[in-house]
Image (tube, rainbow, N blue to C red):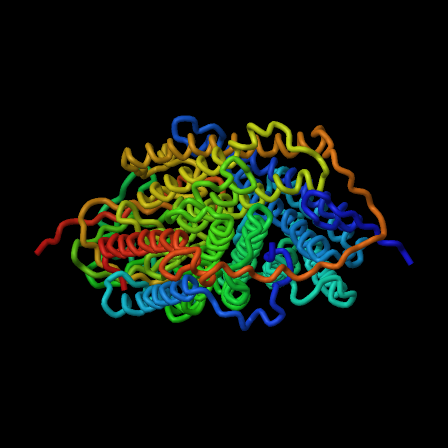
Amino acid sequence: MSTIQPPSEIIWWKQPLDRVEGTWIAIALIWSLIMFVMMPLWHVYGKQNLSNEAYRTTPEAFMAKTQAMVNEYTVRTETNQQIPVVSPPPGSDVYLIARLWQWWPILELEKGQTYRLHIASMDWQHGFSLQPVNINTQILPGYEMVLTLTPDTSGDQTIICNEFCGIGHHNMVGKIRVRESEL
Amino acid sequence: MTKHLFRTCPESGLQFHQSAERLIRAHAVVAVVMLLIGGITALMVTLTRWPAVHLLPADRFYQLLTIHGINMLIYWIIFFEIAVLYFCSSTLLRVRIATPRLAWLGFFLMVAGAVLNNYSVLSGNSSVMMTSYVPMPADPNFYLGLILFAVGALIGCFIFLGTLVIAREEKTYEGSIPLVTFGALTACIIAIFTIAMGAIILIPTYLWSVGLIGYIDPAMYRLIWWGFGHSSQQINVAAHVSVWYAIAAIVFGAKPLSEKVSRGAFLLYIFFLQLASAHHLLVDPGLSSTWKIFNTSYAMYLAVLASMVHGLTVPGSIEVAQRAKGLSRGLFEWLRKAPWGNPVFSGMFISVIGFGFIGGISGVVMGTEQINIIIHNTIYVPGHFHATVVLGTTLAFMSLTYFLIPVLFRRQVILPGLARWQPYLFGGGMALFTLVMMGAGTLGVQRRHWDMTFTDSLLGFDYPASAYTLMGIVGVSGVTAVVGGAIFVLITVGSVFFGKRVDSESHFGTATTRLMRAAPDLTPQGGHAAAGKWGFAAPGTFVLAIFFLSIFVIYYWVNWKYLASVWPLS
């Protein structure tokens, strides 16, 4: 019963451990270290890493930058709300606003090209979940996050909000449309 | 001077201090009430996420989900944990509890806080989820309730520490404190850290909600709040691992393979577990990858190492005890002939397996910095933590309750036939529930989301049919687990209020006995390991551990492979 009684030996920390424990601790430690080094290794050799590039911002400043992009690169509008569809040039800085309960504007990107996608919230916390490719990040008010991404599949991707943001949360849906390369 | 009254339980040999017994009973009873509230809301939430049923309207869904999360993750578990702390100090060490009046003050603060917090959610303007991320506002009473509760729980922690001091001062035990008390001490230390984090973030947030502070930085809120939110789940880990050890001792008379290793593993928890608040911040803006990697891996997975050690030593100690009784044929006779019909054992063993194989593996995988990109905030996340907190903690606490009903409440367990099946129904339903949730999360189904069909959204999205199938199974298995939980509440409440009294006599008196050291090891002929194989005292457990590791390794690489298929990001 000694797990609920004091140890039988007074100097219990000098009792030798059983071989089963020693062996298992060694194996588990090696596995722990392998898992630990995998993360830095993936930063060197893997292709899916967050740069963690982020800036402080304000809703006004971020809105102004987004509006400038929308004014310059809108190609058409969609839905009866006239949501602009923006097709910025490859390699450029692209802005996406998260707000109650909308992702704005709709983005049109080219497959195989790299974009610097800036995302910030205008109000509460939101979650950027791109489906079906399945990329998920947290979006905070006051912070401008930069994702450098290269769409390598064409077709429509949907942005779903995956941080609870009130009663309209489940309707907060946006789009990134990826067209085939024009080359 | 007040007289301290004690009674000795003739069946278990445990000695209860009268004031401590009343406190433990009160905390355990309120815990079960909280479990009941959490369970009713669990049913409503599950039936809403089951696409074919979709029971509640959106506002009610978010409100009940908030109630479910807070009552299960905070109130049920922490009320029970304070009971466990008092049990592991006063009862196990055979000592009077420190300052019982103050302990009652802590209890009433916890009750008042829980009531106030629940009331603010029920009144309709605090459907902010357990996390209450700023700047989404909740009613000031929401935060105030949590603060009151935390103060009460903090008092409980210090009563526990004070009781340990008295036991040492009055020499009620010989040698070092028992391993289970050591584990409870670990839980208590983590709890104090946790409550401090809660105070640091919830007090300013309360002041913000009443207009005295203008701005709370959302990134800072998340960092400190998770020091409270995640660490509170680490209290559970330390507490339920202690419960595993206690049940191994109670049911099998097991002793730890070695005190040094088991206590060392608890020490690793104290040093490293709290770093895991980083698990929630892996895809947040404003933190560096270096910070994320160091913290998410608990330094170098040293807390994972500790859990892998407990995962071996708990069943290992059972195996050694069983082999010493002659159940030593082959690798698994000790396990085959374990008392599978005794819910104290079966619940505990399902808890070990579920926590390790499902909760542990998924937690480490999703806590890998880059892999979190494909998992963050999908329904995979509740899939993971239902495996740790429900299969792990709740089921362990349920098992302990079956033991406590006759010992602490002096009542026989009613409906023993049903009690025999309850851990299997609850554990089986919950295991399936967690697995299909993780599957659905991998397909991109979101957590805390009312409508996976996006019917009312302007742009819409269609999940694959398989996602709907998985969410249907989430519904069925969730209802199964709720039925299992309801049976538990029925049995415990029924036993405590209407159960037949235990026949034996156990009266309070002033006489006490001192807790002696465990009997020294009877070394079997040819050394300790002769009862095992390959020089291992617990070869069957070792084979199980290697099986566990194989699944862990495979699942880990599968997720890297999956990550490699998503768009390049840098």
Residue in front for this viewpoint, B349 or B104:
B349
In this picture, is B484 found above or below B296? above
Residue pushed farthest front? Answer: B525
Q: Position of residue B497 (x, y in %)?
A: 72, 31
Q: Position of residue B457 (x, y in %)?
A: 37, 37
Residue in front for this viewpoint, A36 or B127:
A36
Q: Position of residue B207 (x, y in %)?
A: 65, 58
Residue in front for this viewpoint, B168 or A43:
B168
The residue depicted at 53 percent of the width and 70 percent of the height is: A15
User: In the rendered image, which quarter is residue B2 located in?
Assistant: bottom right
Quadrant containing the C terminus of chain B is bottom left
Q: Position of residue B569 (x, y in %)?
A: 26, 61
The residue depicted at 31 percent of the width and 56 percent of the height is: B553
Q: Is residue B3 left or right of residue B528?
A: right
In this picture, is A9 found above or below B508? below
In this picture, is B407 found above or below B196? above
Q: Is residue B460 left or right of residue B123?
A: left
Q: Is residue B383 left or right of residue B178?
A: left
Residue in front for this viewpoint, B233 or B442:
B233
Q: How many labels sit on residues?
A: 0
User: In the rendered image, which quarter is residue B31 located in?
Assistant: top right
Residue pushed farthest right? Answer: B1
The residue depicted at 57 percent of the width and 48 percent of the height is: B247
| Residue A124 shows in the view | no
User: In the rendered image, which quarter is residue A101 located in?
Assistant: top left
| Residue B501 shows in the view | yes
Quadrant containing the N terminus of chain B is bottom right
In this picture, is B339 found above or below B304? above
